[in-house]
Image (cartoon, rainbow, N blue to C red):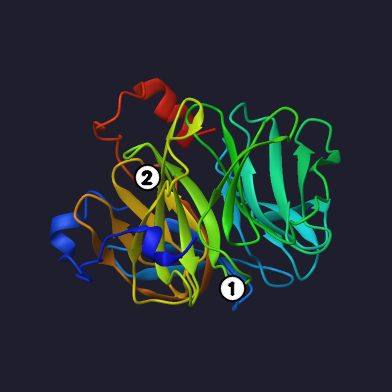
Amino acid sequence: MSAKRAVVAGLLFVLIGTMSVTAQVAQIYAACEGKSTLSQYDYVTGVETTLYNTTGHPDDLVLNSLGQLIYSVPTQGTVNLFDPTTGINTVLANIGGARDLIITPDGNNLMIAKNTAPASIYEYNFSSGTTTIFFPKTKGITSMNGLSFDVYGNFYAVANRTEILQLNPQTAAIVNTLVLETGKAGGADGLTYDSYTNSLWTTHDSNTLGDGLVQIPVQASGFVSTSPGFSFYPINMGGLDGIKSDGSGNLYIGAIWTAPVYNIPTNTLLYNPVVKGADGVALVPGTYGAQRSNKTTVPQSARDAAQNP
């Protein structure tokens, strides 16, 4: 799909004053690839705190219900759990090329995108500690990146950096495919569900479609549309990677050298601080408020569950 077929909306690159957004913006945990650290960043104070020095370069980052950090280290081929209250780090699984992560809505399993050949998705069971292949090597798919569940339980994955796959969460069968662009120079990477817009959002970094954010509306059956099925919001910033939503209209992004906060309703960047190496990001529990009312009819209880699997 060419960029001309996308619905393009320009980004007003404005930094809003701290006083106007203090109550809205969360603190983040960041997997800092370049520095080999797990860090915590406070947007209001501008303070970055190193929590743990990792072995190898960490990539993606998610939190479990206990507030523990689960992160991937592709250079080591491991998925790890770090407890910020005890400082203890544990290796959960050994998977070469492990990158993007998502916890299933029931909290029982961790889905792991393997980005090296053969590209696939693994499933790690927290109770048994076992790892199995969920989505096996498939013809035509050479890479796997961002993973996400929506509020309806649909499962999605970024494939080949050019398309979003909707996968059956039980069988791994491909239900539908949304093509963002054609060719081998695609740039889709991180993926998150946002309850404020009832949409998937993916970071994007390429010379074809451009650098920015892609919004993909969803419904109970999955994609609202596949023609073209998305809106593109350009940002003059490379290295866009990890992304998370707070459900209140803000998207938190790891962009290698910075960790911007994009505000959806105003189409602005609230903050764009230097957080060197920021890749995967996650919201620090207790640092952001209750979700504001949404334009969609998704029940609040379901939206809460999607934000806190």
The percent coordinates of residue 184 (x first, y second) are: 63, 71
Of residue 91 and residue 201, the one placed in the foreground of this image is 201
The percent coordinates of residue 12 (x first, y second) are: 20, 68
Q: Taking the image as drawn, is residue 84 in sight?
A: no
Q: Which residue sits at x=18%, y=64%?
A: 18
User: 102 above or below 233?
Assistant: above
In the image, taking residue 8 as reference, residue 53 lies left or right, namely: right
Q: Taking the image as drawn, is residue 155 in sight?
A: yes
Q: Which residue is mark 1?
A: 185
Q: Name the mark on residue 295.
A: none
Of residue 58 and residue 67, the one placed in the foreground of this image is 58
User: 137 above or below 289?
Assistant: below
Q: Are marks 2 and 1 in contact (CB under 8 Å)?
A: no
Q: Which residue sits at x=65%, y=66%?
A: 58
Q: Residues within 10 Å of mark 1 (few under 14, many from 20)?
A: some
Q: Which residue is mark 2?
A: 246
Q: In front of the other: label 2 or label 1?
A: 1
Q: Looking at the image, is mark 2 or mark 1 earlier in the sequence?
A: 1
In the image, taking residue 263 as reference, residue 123 lies left or right, namely: right
Q: Which residue sits at x=32%, y=40%?
A: 197
The C terminus, quarter of image? top right
In the image, taking residue 136 as reference, residue 62 lies left or right, namely: left
> In which quarter of the view is residue 105 placed?
top right
Q: Which residue sits at x=27%, y=62%?
A: 44
The percent coordinates of residue 231 (x first, y second) are: 36, 53
Q: Secondary structure at mark 2?
A: loop
Amino acid marked by disc 2: Asp
User: 59 above or below 110?
Assistant: below
Q: Residues within 10 Å of mark 2 (few under 14, many from 20)?
A: many
In the image, taking residue 139 as reference, residue 99 lies left or right, namely: left
Alpha carbon distance from label 2 to label 1: 30 Å
Q: Secondary structure at mark 1?
A: loop
